[in-house]
Image: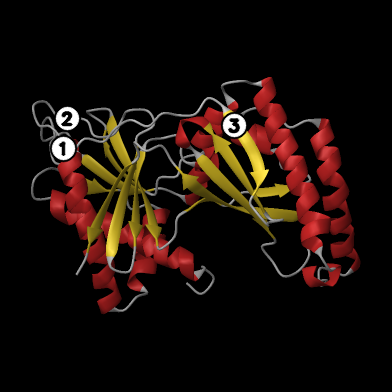
Amino acid sequence: MAKIATQTINGKAFEFALLIEFLERLKIVTSVSVIENESFKTAQKCFLSFKEKEQGNYKLNASFAVNFLLDIEPRLSNGVSNKDVLQLEILADKAGQIGDVRDVLAIRSLQKWEIGISAKNNHRAVKHSRLSNDIDFGQKWLGFPCSTEYFKEVGLIFDNLAKLRTASKATQKWNTLGDYHTSVYVPILDAFKKELLRLDKENPGVVAEHLIEYLVGNKDFYKVIKGSNKVEIQAYNLHGTLNLSFENVKPKAKVPRLKLPNRLIEVVYQENSKTTLLVTLNEGWQISFRIHNASSRIEPSLKFDINLVSAPHSLFSNQLFIS
């Protein structure tokens, strides 16, 4: 367990608590099975690494969320027959690399239906993506390759960083470079900004949508955010697959469908910042891209901390306060 970061342990413990609460609540009303894959075992270990009191806190938060989700997702509780088994599964982290941000899945194969939960423990980051000499963010994120010019521009910076790392046998630290925000971050962000705008111009109406699907999620999902004394549930109903009725059983609350953007409005630096770009799209979407070095030692890649600054007004959000 020591090799796993604290934030990851907390997140996985919450994933396990959500799955267990789904199981406890649903096994008395419908047929349920749990897929005990490696992700399940990892999450279980993380959960069991906490003392009983903290486990209880995770389960309490999860139970609030599960009770609410049962009200707005009737298919969780209702099967068409005894053979209509609800499968509960924890997804592997690598799913997020291809745009599926869901952690916990509830699947009814007979109904060809599923919903997913993205479980967050006290944080709201959307993605942590990297830039480097050989990462084609255009192809990976948007489905359109970056230009040779982009790779030439970032190559000048990343090649130099690679030489410094090799020469120092991976010991030289970033702070030896002086104002590296200006000498490293700004030219990389400038190249990224220029390339993103170029990709949008050459693929009008598509890049904005693909960007949101990659960063926010290409499958509809509920985001469940565990706070210190509350749980927040957000519904990213981008494709209209959430909040469906089961026969004559209707959800107890309506979750509106979110509109995907089709236009990139602007890419600007956040005020007084050399590390953060704000990307504004139509339909009310805005995303921040904060670049940073993941290690204190120089390496030829940089990491983005990507956050959703604003979403459409129609984003369903509900806060459940825990006394």
Q: Which of 293 and 50 is in front in this view?
A: 293
Find residue 28 and name its label: none
Q: Which residue lies furthest to the front in this view?
A: 271
Residue 309 place in picture, x, y as percent:
49, 48
Q: Residues within 10 Å of mark 3 (few under 14, many from 20)?
A: some
Mark 2–mark 1 Cα distance, whole angstroms, equals 6 Å
Q: Distance between the residues labelled 2 and 3?
A: 36 Å
Residue 15 seen by the camera:
yes
Q: Which residue is drawn at 76% across and 69% down?
A: 297
| Rendered view: 38 above or below 114 | below
What residue type is disc 1 on?
A: Pro
In depth, the one of 38 and 299 nearer the eye is 299
Mark 2 and mark 3 lie on one chain; the one further toward the N terminus is 2
Kindly identify the residue that appears in the image at 71 percent across and 55 percent down.
Answer: 302
Disc 2 + disc 1, Cβ < 8 Å: yes
Q: Is 105 left, or right, of 214 in this rendering?
A: left
Classify mark 3: helix, strand or loop: strand
**What element does badge 1 sit on?**
helix
Mark 1, other Cα within 10 Å: few <14 / some 14–19 / many ≥20 = many
- What percent of the width, then of the height, locates residue 316? 30, 41
Is residue 299 shown to the viewer in this render? no
Q: What residue type is labelled 3?
A: Ile
Q: Which amino acid does label 2 sit on?
A: Ser
Find disc 2 in the rendering and name its residue. 245
Q: Residue at x 88, y 47 (%)?
A: 156
Q: Quadrant of the C terminus?
A: bottom left
Q: Residue 265 carries which label?
A: 3
Distance Cα–Cα, label 3 vs label 1: 39 Å
- The earlier-in-sequence mark between 2 and 1 is 1
In front of the other: label 2 or label 3? 3
The residue singled out by tag 1 in the image is: 74
